[in-house]
Image: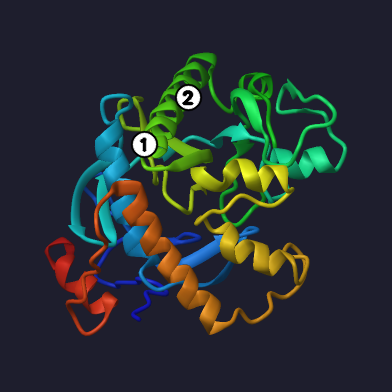
Amino acid sequence: MRILPEAHFPELPNYYHGKVRDNYDLPDGRRIIISSDRLSAFDRILTCIPYKGEVLTQTARYWFEETSDICPNHVLEYPDPNVVVGTRLDILPVEVIVRGYLAGTTGTSILTLYKAGQRDMYGFSFADGMQDNQRLDQPIITPTSKAFDAGHDEPLTAAEIVSTNLLTAKQWETVSSYALALFARGQKMAAEKGLILADTKYEFGTDKDGNILLADEIHTPDSSRYWMADSYEQCVAEGKRPQSFDKDFVRSWVAERCDPYKDDIPDIPASLIEETSHVYRKAYEMITGKPFTPDESGATVLDRIRKNLSTYFA
């Protein structure tokens, strides 16, 4: 299987290497965003998963097109299966995470904080005696500070976001309204495919005119937690993690073997990487209802992308 660990093209200007994406800012205000096969969790790169970048780009494309009536987004065109060209935005310094369930494994997830004894978090109060992965009465927004340059995300409340001038009151009202509407659409469409959209994150930015647009990705297996609806009730009743195909698949394996925030990451077995690749492809097919047929043109993924981006080279 073919892997894209990174996509560095000296012919393109203003290179920025993100956690999983390689970006280039063009002089005319467009940004080229290339999804690699890097798998990020715990604020670090764990491994590379074949076809992951293509799955993420095409899954996000599906959702951007299905939600454009709710919220404007940054997309301009798709010159390659791993690439989106979008309007360059000033990314807002807040990640907007919407949660419908008491779930998660990271240090900022409500389940992790709840199991550590916290009952008041993100401006919400939680009752004692809740079960792992229990459905919340209604979806909530649990925002975190947007960590740039490999920093750590930190929990925020809506009041803190406005009082510290991370966003204006009007901006927060807009992004929170967009986020809840996008999540409702995502949950409804996921349910029609036999899936539960448990939680997700959204990133927003402003264009040169100050308009707020949805950026990055939407409702992909990397940015969202999906569970299989038909087994959810039994798994929760038995105290098991619901069956899923999100990146908890690898993340849980790592977390069981080390402190992923402090220790060296153990070598991840090739069989787990191959199985995870299959899970990503299956995720695309279940989420979109379309077969996943990878683009195998070019000697390598990098060669194919180079050819498809040649018209953007200076």
The type of residue carrying mark 1 is: Glu
Q: How is the image coloured?
A: rainbow
Identify the residue shown where x is 71% and y is 42%.
Answer: 237
The C terminus lies in quadrant: bottom left
In the figure, residue 167 lies in which quadrant? top right
Residue 192, which numbered label? Answer: 1
Is residue 267 left or right of 219 when viewed as pictured? right
Identify the residue shown where x is 44% and y is 19%.
Answer: 174
Packing grade of label 2 (10 A; few <14, some 14-19, many >=20) is some
SS type, badge 2 = helix
In front: mark 1 or mark 2? 1
In the figure, residue 56 lies in which quadrant? bottom left
Q: Residue 199 or 229: which is nearer the viewer?
A: 229
SS type, badge 1 = helix
- Picture coordinates of residue 268, whole percent (x, y): 60, 79
Residue 180, which numbered label? Answer: 2
